[in-house]
Amino acid sequence: MIASVRAAWFADRKRPAVWTVTLTWTALALAFGIGVPYLVHFALAGDPKEAEAAASLLDSVLPGQLVTTGIGLFPLFGGAIVVILGALVVGNEYRWGTLNLIFTQRPRRTQVMLGHAIALCGLTLLVAVLTFVALAAVTTAIALVEGRELDLPTPGRLAAAIAAAWLICTAHAALGYLLAVAFRSTATAIAVGLVWTLVLENAISGLALVLSPLTALRNVLLAPSSGALAGALGARSQFDGGTPGVLDAANAALPVTVLVGYVVVMFGLGTWLAARRDVG
């Protein structure tokens, strides 16, 4: 098993597409989480009538709001990007015919696929950590420029936010993993995954606001559960002017349970399917 994980990790970190997706997401997180609010703050700062709004926007890009600003980016935007990452890691193995060769060698199919799953968990942890490191660096720079205090969150609160972001990313990556195995195609897996998370689930979530029978279904969907976890950590709901995809939640127990279920079920189904189905 260790050899399979090391082999998968070696392959993943050598893929340009993996780093392209990771760095693209980091740039988007900085742009939408910090850049856009800061630029709007400058646009409003000269208008006395908008002074309160400008001050609120500035506060949102300072280190004190690092946790809420960072975790709020993951349910909708980060999740979609990581679905692509999960599909790329496994889908390209089918595209290049690598699995056909590996499956004829000594490692068992289950070991090979679990190696990919564990390596993918490592990649999602890297994405979560890199995102918060980048956000912390930029918010600190803004605080120094603006002459504000470096009111960084406590280590425990920051660790909880990174863990939540890792769980959200891993659940979405597991979806990409399963779809890549099911379709044996990177492009199809990405298309279906994005439609699922960005269109279908958000449509059901919206309908649940007016059709109460759909509320129970919304509570076990991937994107709404991610949004509820972000809301439980303090991110402002999309219905309260916050980041799209974030939902109000009294506590994190239910969304954490649902997301852990997605990780286990999606990786499990993908591994079982790859191990049982002929590869051709």
Image (spheres, grey):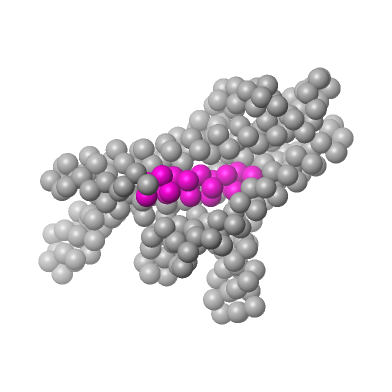
Q: Does residue 152 sit above or below 279 in this rendering?
A: below
Where is residue 274? Give x, y as percent: 79, 37
Quarter of the image for the N terminus: give it.
Answer: top right
Residue drawn 60% across the image and 67% down it: 218
Residue drawn 60% across the image and 35% down it: 120
Q: Residue 273 lies in what quarter of the image? A: top right
Where is residue 52? Give x, y as percent: 19, 66
Q: Which residues are magenta?
A: 157-174
> Is 263 displayed left or right of 41 in the figure?
right
Where is residue 144? Give x, y as percent: 17, 41
Q: Does residue 65 sit above or below 1 in this rendering?
A: below
Q: Residue 3 lies in what quarter of the image? A: top right
Where is residue 86? Give x, y as percent: 62, 40
Is residue 173 within the magenta segment?
yes
> Is 162 displayed left or right of 266 in the figure?
left
Taking depth in this image into account, of 111 and 205 the one nearest to the observer is 111
Q: Residue 178 lies in what quarter of the image? A: top right
Residue drawn 55% across the image and 56% down it: 256
- Magenta region, mostly helix, strand or loop? helix
Do we see residue 3 in this rendering?
Answer: yes
Q: Does residue 94 sit above or below 57 in this rendering?
A: above
Do we see residue 94 in this rendering?
Answer: no
> Is 54 displayed left or right of 1 in the figure?
left
Quarter of the image for the C terminus: give it.
Answer: top right
Outermost residue, top direction? 105
Is residue 99 within the magenta segment?
no
> Is 88 displayed left or right of 44 in the figure?
right
